[in-house]
Amino acid sequence: MDDLEKAILISFDESGAVDSALKAQAVGYCQQIKETSSICSICIERLCFSKLVQVQFWCLQCLHEVLRVRYSSMGPEEKSFIRKSVFSLACYESIDDKNLVRVLDGPAFIKNKLAQVMVTLICFEYPMIWPSVFVDFLSNLSKGVVVIDMFCRVLNALDEEVISLDYPRSQEEVAIAGQIKDAMRQQCISQVVRAWYDILLMYRNSDPDLCCSVLDSMRRYVSWIDIGLIANDAFVGLLFELMLVSGFPDQLRGAAAGCIHAVAAKRMDPKAKLTLLQSLQIRKVFGLVAEDNDSELVSSVSSLLTGYSTEVLECSKRLNSEDGKAVSTELLNEVLPSVFYVMQNCEIDETFSIVQFLSGYVGTLKSLAPLTETQSLHVGQILDVIRSQIRFDPAYRNNLNMLDKTGKEEEDRMAEFRKDLFVLLRSVGRVAPDATQLFIRNSLASAVASNGDVNVEEIEAALSLLYAFGESLSDETMKTGNGLLGELIPMLLSTKFPCHNNRLVALIYLETVTRYMKFFQENTQYIPLVLSAFLDERGIHHPNRNVSRRASYLFMRIVKLLKAKLVPYIETILQSLQDTVAQFTTIYAVSKELSGCEDGSHIFEAIGLLIGMEDVPLEKQSEYLTALLTPLCQQVEALLLNAKSQNPEESPAKITNIQQIIMAINALSKGFSERLVTASRPAIGLMFKQTLDVLLRILIIYPKIEPLRCKVTSFIHRMVDILGSSVFPYLPKALEQLLAESEPKELAGFLLLLNQLICKFNTGVKDILEEVYPAIASRVFNILPRDAFPTGPGSNTEEIRELQELQRTFYTFLHVIATHDLSSVFLSSKSRAYLDLMMQLILHASCNHKDILVRKACVQMFIRLIKDWCVSPYGEEKVPGFRSFVMEAFATNCCLYSVLDKSFEFRDANSLVLFGEIVLVQKVMFEKFGNDFLVHFVSKSLQSAHCPQDLAEQYCQKLQGSDIKALKSFYQSLIENLRRQQNGSLGSFLYILFVESHGQRGVNLRKQFLDMKMLIYHNFAAHKGGLGLLQRVGGSQCHRFSIFSLDLLRCSFFCGSVCMK
């Protein structure tokens, strides 16, 4: 063993016994040898003498890589040597007299790697350099099994590496594949097919594994060779013999089925294809599916039947002749019973393909009315298939009922698996609605009559069919109960299955009743049955908590729909729910597993919807509401009273209990309208005010418990909705408590509450806003970073996401204030200190924020502020400096520079809407500032962008006109023209402008300029930033920068020390 072989063995070692440094040294040595010019000779020599499979594999891998990389640079002699050597290895020949080792005696992976090297040579040399490769190989097949096996491996590798379109290919690879296929068709493919046939005849009894390899190769090549070479009596007869004779191994029989499938799937003219399919006499294989249902053979035959059926159906769609359609129908009628049998009785991997085929078949029936007897029979069989496929496996019954990890995985798997089957069911329901309803009724009746404990899965499947079928029904059909629905729904309601305690059965039962709830709108006589289904042990009182909580949610949906029709039953409903209501707010009844949508509070929403109707007499309404609110408020008061004396272990449980109570009251209030609470029945409103007063005390006792603050905030939202302006006396205390010590996430929620108040009451909340806005502005400007949020790895933290959400909510808050006639809030004595920061913030966002919708909102704010604060072109300034700031900073940066930048994409719909707002604000500025704006924008802003004079004049004309659409269209073309002029780069534009202003000396300041340009472009996010950078640049350089950025620096007009007019 020489050094190379030792190094290869060490580099391949996976035992861990070899020192890592030694292994790295060995790998390096191998790599060094690989890079020598004689590597091909070295590898071929080793393949002749070394019996070590690691060495053989490394040498073949080297040859493969070297050929791919260096083939074009090799000389003719080296190529010839490699070609002859590799071919000799593949044909079990000796390269020279000293050849002691035959590679074909090695394991399969060595032979596969040799096949890969052969294919690499074929790609480079066939047919131009080595045209005889396949013919030469065929002449060596007489050497026996070893060479035949290698020939099959080469053909398979050629398919996988070059020909097959199952893998993505480049255009060059597709061209090479086409060249190889064309040459093989002309030169040798008929000889290859003949060799396949002879090998199968010779070895079918003695070497089935070899025959499987031949059939695998043949299956791959059928799609592109002359089909007549295979689809003839001799070859098809041999394939059917291999498939049908029970003495052959299943693997061989299945491989023969795969070849027949490939023949059936051959792409060709539909008329010729139908003739081919007819000639296959597929009926011969129908009996095979009744053999061992789990065997490999049945799986292959199932795939064949599915593929054959799909091809027949496709021919039927493409053929217009009556004869063609008749033949297609006959063939389908012949094969479908076997397809149905496979689906119902066999464990196969073809379920998805069969469902897709059946969906296509049902689709063809839509245009056929009425259905023939045979087609109706097929529809019934399809429904049988669906029912059998959607059944859960009884082996998972306990897992699914307890919903442990295994049960959850199985439930998720079945939910995904059922999707296509339910789509098929709905398609069948549209084609044959009566037959589908009859099938579901019989399935349900059969399930009812069966032993429920034994047939849990049967009952669940029947209910699931009824549930899924409901999706295909129109509202009108469901309301009137046409067909058998009028019988099905009462049967469903009156049935109590023996296995109703099973979680899956209980859930699908309730979901199905809810699915058909529109039926009860017109058929009110069934309402008592509906109520029983939800209120007894089948629903809300089910022993499984998951079921009872889901029942609460579904019952709320039923109540929301039927509402007034349930008034006569309110007493009965409330009595049935007494224990459920009490249990919900019991301190130890809280479950962490049941949260979010199905937390159980929906039962209170249902009660609120019932008792909150005006159809309920005032006395009764007050009685019901008092009975609910009084004990809940008393519980809260008791918990708050004992808060200070609680030990740490009790506190979390009691806090959770308070949360539950707030959720219950909040849900209850959803049934009451503002008109009822404030106008028609103010006594009800008083009860909610008293409740609000109690719940606001929670913020005082537990000021830092974030979940409680969120729940109270949510309740205040509800009270704003239903109490209207009468909630005002409670707001100061509530807002003060919510704003105190609030974290970013809570502060964002607080701003949402203020947005609701502003949108509902407009200027009515002016006094409240003037009081709280300064505190909000102070908190927000202290919390939010002055610079942009960090990006890149590690920047997507929960803290940063909360700050980003706060920033977005704050922009919305400012927008809501500005657009609801409340801009004077910004000018109050307490708020004015934050005006500069606010203007810098919205100016920066209007130009640079990555969210286009935020930029649009900021531009809209400027429109409103200009209208509110700028009365006339020559009147007294309401806000000193604002007019100058808008014209010099906002107009230049937002209306020009931000849209000049190539990042502003006109093809984006949202960007186009933003552009419309930018054009509109220019119109508003002209209306408010007159010629001052026009002169400044044209003579300074547009001129600095090198705008041609004629375009500037056209801009003035369009701006002074009344057609805003024409202005928008022209301004877009103006911006695009300037972009082309500046190559679409704002950075280049600013730099060119700077150098033009200061000559060659400006180039020397390039680094400082780039920093300054970024600061200018970001519009002084912090008003002290500009001054600080100018101080760092220093001296005369500072002076030059100040001249260049004179207009932009005016954006700090509120900070007199920075303003350089």
Image (cartoon, grey):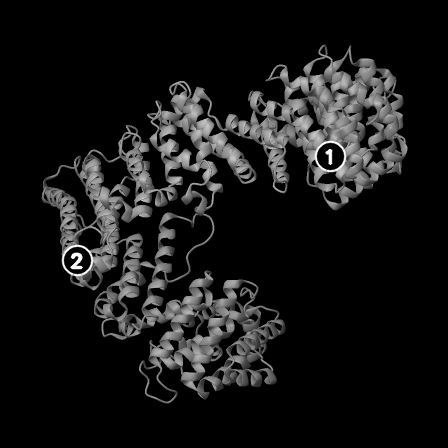
Please tell me which residue lies in front, 92 or 329.
329
**Considering only vertical position in the picture, is 957 above or below 378?**
below
Picture quarter with the C terminus: bottom left
| Disc marking residue 900 | none
Q: Amino acid at mark 1?
A: Ala
Q: Which residue is mark 2?
A: 681
Q: Kindly identify the residue that appears in the image at 73 percent across and 18 percent down.
A: 243
CA gap between label 2 and label 1 equals: 74 Å
Look at the picture and state if 1018 lies above or below 543.
below
- Of residues 290 and 875, which is closer to you in this image? 290
Secondary-structure class at tag 2: loop
Q: Which residue sits at x=67%, y=28%?
A: 333
Residue 724 in the image, given as x and y percentages of width and height: 22, 62
Q: Nearer the viewer, mark 2 or mark 1?
A: 1
Say which quarter of the image contains residue 82.
top right
Q: Earlier in the sequence, mark 2 or mark 1?
A: 1
Number of numbered callouts drawn:
2
Residue 985 spot, x, y in % from top left: 57, 68
- Location of the N terminus by quadrant is top right
- What residue is disc 1 on? 326
* Residue 1059 vertical placement versus 37 (above, below): below
Question: Which of the 4 quarters of the picture holds residue 251?
Answer: top right
At horizontal 50% and vertical 78% (from top left) the residue drawn is 964
Q: Position of residue 296 (x, y in %)?
A: 64, 19
Q: Nearer the viewer, residue 110 or 590?
A: 590
Circle 1 sits in a helix, a strand or a loop, which is it?
A: helix
User: Does any portion of residue 91 appear in the rendered image?
Assistant: no
Amino acid carrying label 2: it is Arg
Q: Nearer the viewer, residue 756 or 14?
A: 756
Q: Is residue 305 left or right of residue 731?
A: right
